[in-house]
Image: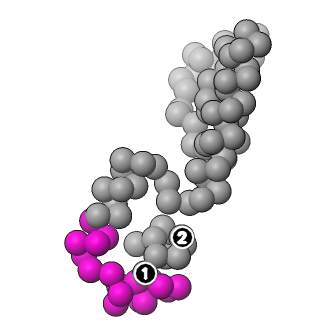
């Protein structure tokens, strides 16, 4: 519910959203988010820019990953062994 309100869906407060949106609509938004990603327009813009940067990187022979161009993305945790390899 918080993400919906933060992105202007249902009202400007949680209370307004609860009054304005049915449970079925919340489930529909949840399914949309699961399928298409975040509702946050800035997060979506960051992903689009990262895709372009990744394509440029690959055309120039780079081997970066998409997440390397997304500074605000959550990175998957790495093991202690993987972290120690990067220190050498």
Magenta-highlighted residues: 11-27
Name the residue beneath numbered marker 2.
Answer: 7
Above or below, comparing residue 64 to residue 88 in the picture: below
- As helix, strand or loop, the secondary structure at mark 2 comes to loop
Quadrant the N terminus occupies = bottom left
Q: Residues within 10 Å of mark 2 (few under 14, many from 20)?
A: some
**Visual colour scheme:** one colour
Q: Are marks 2 and 1 in contact (CB under 8 Å)?
A: no
Residue at 57 percent of width and 22 percent of height: 80
Residue 59 falls inside the magenta stretch: no
Spot occupied by residue 13 in the image (x, y as percentages of width and height): 50, 86
- Residue at the image position 61 percent from the left and 42 percent from the top: 47
Examine the image and state in which quarter residue 64 appears.
Answer: top right
Q: Residue at x 36, y 50 (%)?
A: 34
**In the rendered image of this protein, does residue 88 appear above or below residue 41?**
above
Which of these two is toward me, 74 or 12?
A: 12
- Tell me the residue that label 1 is attached to: 10
Residue 39: where, in percent of width, then height? 50, 59
Q: Main secondary structure of the magenta part?
A: helix
Q: Nearer the viewer, residue 32 or 70?
A: 32
Is 1 drawn above or below residue 41 in the view shown?
A: below
Whole-number angstrom distance, CA of label 2 to CA of label 1? 9 Å
């Amino acid at each position: 519910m918080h993400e919906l309100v933060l992105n202007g869906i249902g009202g400007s407060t949680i209370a307004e959203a609860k009054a304005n949106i049915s449970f079925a609509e919340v489930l529909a938004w949840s399914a949309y988010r699961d399928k298409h990603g975040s509702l946050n327009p800035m997060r979506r813009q960051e992903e689009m820019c990262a895709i372009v940067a990744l394509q440029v990187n690959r055309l120039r022979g780079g081997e970066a990953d998409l997440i390397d161009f997304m500074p605000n993305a959550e990175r998957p945790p790495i093991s202690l062994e993987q972290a120690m390899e990067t220190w050498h």
